[in-house]
Image (spheres, helix red, strand yellow):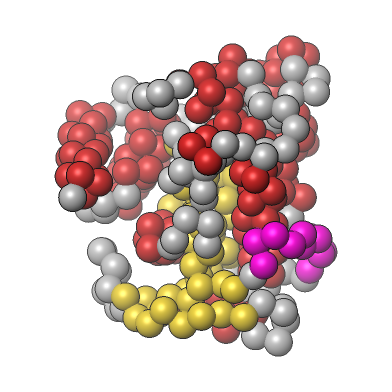
């Protein structure tokens, strides 16, 4: 971003077009985005893992076409379990564990919990490398972590699978770039970011009218296919905000605080969220300078 902001946004946008399309194709639903972070939910663990592998393989091919200093690598964490669904968003321990797994993963890799590995035994051809138990913040019991072993240079089709018990959360973030084909117009990226979480069908139609062949066309059409949600009253909206804040306030995942500020730009905890982001950014800078 510091060297060439426009090129970085184009790269990020092009990667996002790949990610969004694969999530939709894999029957997933994007529940939140913030900066270079994506949170998606799947009804099937098989679909979640297949989609994650397909994303990493597609981005490997995309990065191969770019100069070394323009490439972005993606880390993915996958967890299975109950999540809280409020106001078209998901949060809770299930999401927090997925975020912690993503932070542990190496660039270009996929980390999953024991529950994900156990669900997939004898159902998929992937092998899993046991990375041992890890203590993660705000989770009382240690989490057993596994790395999914796959060929990054292969291509994996997305099969249609039967839903499994529980919901799978994928957390993708910290991309160190972009796809085969066109790079997205930064103006288009900003347009889409301004409407993607609105739930307003008119805004999605406006995007499609302006960018009929845009990078987010498939996602806009998917959002249009959903019924328009009724707008919550003020009291209900505040309750959702309070639950959202309570689920992230003690965490150390910057993307969670960015998501809060994006969803509630004038929210009750805006100042606290900005302070935590500044603290986490300072900590990251110290770690990078070591």
* Residue at the image position 72 percent from the left and 38 percent from the top: 180
Above or below — where is 233 with respect to 205? below
* Residue at the image position 72 percent from the left and 43 percent from the top: 21
Quadrant in which residue 284 is drawn: top left
**Between 229 and 208, the one nearer to me in the picture:** 208
Residue 68 placed where, x, y %?
53, 41
Quarter of the picture holding the N terminus:
top left
Residue 89 placed where, x, y %?
50, 44
Above or below — where is 195 with respect to 290? above
Residue 7 visible in the shown view = yes
**What's the magenta region?**
151-161
Residue 71 placed where, x, y %?
54, 40
Return the residue found at the far bottom: 122
**Between 178 and 128, the one nearer to me in the picture:** 178
Residue 112 placed where, x, y %?
50, 70
Above or below — where is 34 with respect to 151? above
């Amino acid at each position: 971003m510091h060297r060439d902001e426009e090129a970085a946004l184009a790269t990020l946008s092009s990667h996002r077009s790949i990610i969004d399309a694969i999530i939709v194709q894999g029957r997933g639903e994007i529940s939140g985005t913030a900066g270079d972070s994506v949170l998606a939910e799947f009804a099937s663990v098989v679909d979640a893992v297949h989609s994650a592998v397909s994303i990493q393989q597609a981005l490997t091919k995309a990065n191969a076409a770019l100069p070394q200093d323009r490439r972005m690598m993606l880390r993915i964490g996958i967890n299975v379990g109950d999540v809280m669904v409020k106001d078209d968003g998901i949060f809770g321990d299930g999401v927090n564990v997925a975020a912690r797994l993503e932070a542990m993963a190496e660039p270009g890799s996929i980390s999953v919990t024991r529950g994900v590995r156990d669900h997939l035994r004898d159902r998929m051809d992937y092998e899993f490398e046991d990375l041992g138990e890890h203590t993660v913040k705000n989770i009382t019991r240690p989490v057993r972590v596994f790395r999914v072993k796959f060929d990054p240079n292969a291509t994996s089709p997305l099969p249609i699978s039967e839903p499994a018990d529980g919901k799978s959360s994928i957390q993708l973030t910290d991309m160190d770039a972009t796809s085969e084909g066109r790079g997205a117009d930064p103006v288009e990226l900003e347009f889409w970011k301004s409407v993607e979480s609105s739930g307003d069908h008119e805004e999605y139609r406006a995007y499609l009218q302006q960018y009929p062949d845009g990078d987010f066309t498939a996602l806009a059409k998917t959002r249009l296919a959903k019924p328009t949600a009724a707008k919550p009253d003020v009291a209900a909206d505040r309750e959702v905000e309070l639950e959202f804040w309570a689920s992230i306030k003690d965490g150390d995942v910057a993307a969670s605080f960015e998501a809060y500020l994006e969803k509630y730009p004038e929210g009750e905890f805006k100042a606290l969220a900005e302070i935590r982001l500044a603290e986490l950014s300072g900590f990251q800078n110290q770690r990078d300078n070591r």
